[in-house]
Image: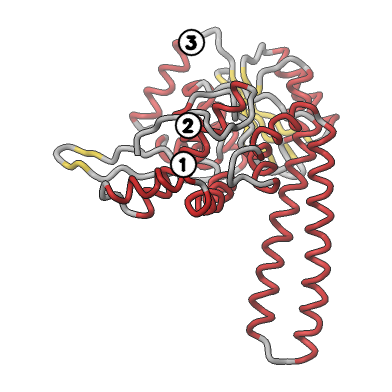
Amino acid sequence: MSRTQEKIDDLTRNDNAAVHAGVDVSKEALDVFISPHALRLRVDNNKTGIKALIRQCKRHDVRLVAMEATGKYHCLLHELLSEAGIAAAVVNPFRMRQFADSLGRLAKTDTIDAEVIARFAACMKPETTPPPTAPSKALKGLHAARRQVLDEIGDLKRKLHATDHALAAKQMRARLKMAERHKEALDQEIRALIAADAAMKRKFDILTSIPGIGAATAGILITDLSELGQVNARQIAALTGVAPMNWDSGAKNGKRMIRGGRKTARNALYMCAVCCIRRSSQMGGFYRQLIKRGKSPKVALTAVIRKLAILANTLIAQDRCWQPHCPSPQIRP
């Protein structure tokens, strides 16, 4: 047993009242480990199996159930646990893998993963994750489908450019037109879904009032950056993945760099930032000022993205639309 694991075991034992459960989620089954009772069980990933899991959690007074984000396969478990009044946390699989490595658990099986997740919950005490509302869940599914269609459109365009066979090109053009129709249908459905929900509609109106942010980007931000208006400026920058992180060690003072965050939101704001630099006098002036101060174009563009994210977060928190002469949030490049 590694020294790190011994320390974690000590922390777990010291909190005698705390019982945590880790669940490794797959399409067909749920592997469960309840700590510190070392209870293992396997149930089906359906309502019947999850109800059996909930009974075990209530029987052992489980404080928190942790699970990895696994696309759609963890959603039913998350919803039913919340309905039963049991706290649940959905954690990043990458963090879980790093935690397992720190324990020296190099092997990977469903039962090992469930135990590691339970130990993570007991040691790190992740925050409870509320389940998404029905409109948010539907919007997320639509945006996932839209991203897939966009990838298909880009792939077809590249293949069409590379082919010189008449029949192959004809078929690709037909598939391209169909994919573009599908994209338009998804866009219409996304707009209708946002318009039908008052809270999302208000966020949409605020976001689209900001120069450079269009309907597509606003939808992506509402879907993938739901914390807008609920956190502070530093937190929203970190969630977007444009917060500079120190990279120092000993006498070395490395350059700060951005890392992590929501890639889809960052990519969407990237194009908005490029548009703002060209068309907005405020953002364009901010960008050029950074260039004159010796910042590289990449660093200056990242600062514009961060400024847009903070501006969107501030306006939604204050429940007001952008005005041409309102002061912009002050941030350090």
> Of all residues shown, which one is farthest toward the front?
325
Q: Looking at the image, can residue 74 be seen?
A: yes
Left or right: 103 in relation to 135: left
Q: Distance between the residues labelled 2 and 3?
A: 46 Å
First along the sequence among labels 2 and 3? 3
Q: Distance between the residues labelled 1 and 3?
A: 53 Å
> Of all residues shown, which one is farthest toward the bottom?
165
The residue beneath circle 1 is 282
Q: Which residue is at 63% across, 25% downward?
A: 320
Q: Distance between the residues labelled 1 and 2?
A: 9 Å
Residue 214 on image: x %, y %:
66, 47
For label 1, the SS is helix
Residue 131 got which mark?
A: none
Q: Which residue is at 77% across, 47% downward?
A: 142
Tag nearer the camera, 2 or 3: 2
For label 2, the SS is loop
The residue beneath circle 3 is 15
Q: Which residue is at 76% across, 40% downward?
A: 139
The residue beneath circle 2 is 328
Tag nearer the camera, 1 or 3: 1
Residue 189 on image: x %, y %:
84, 46
> In what quadrant of the picture does the C terminus appear?
top left
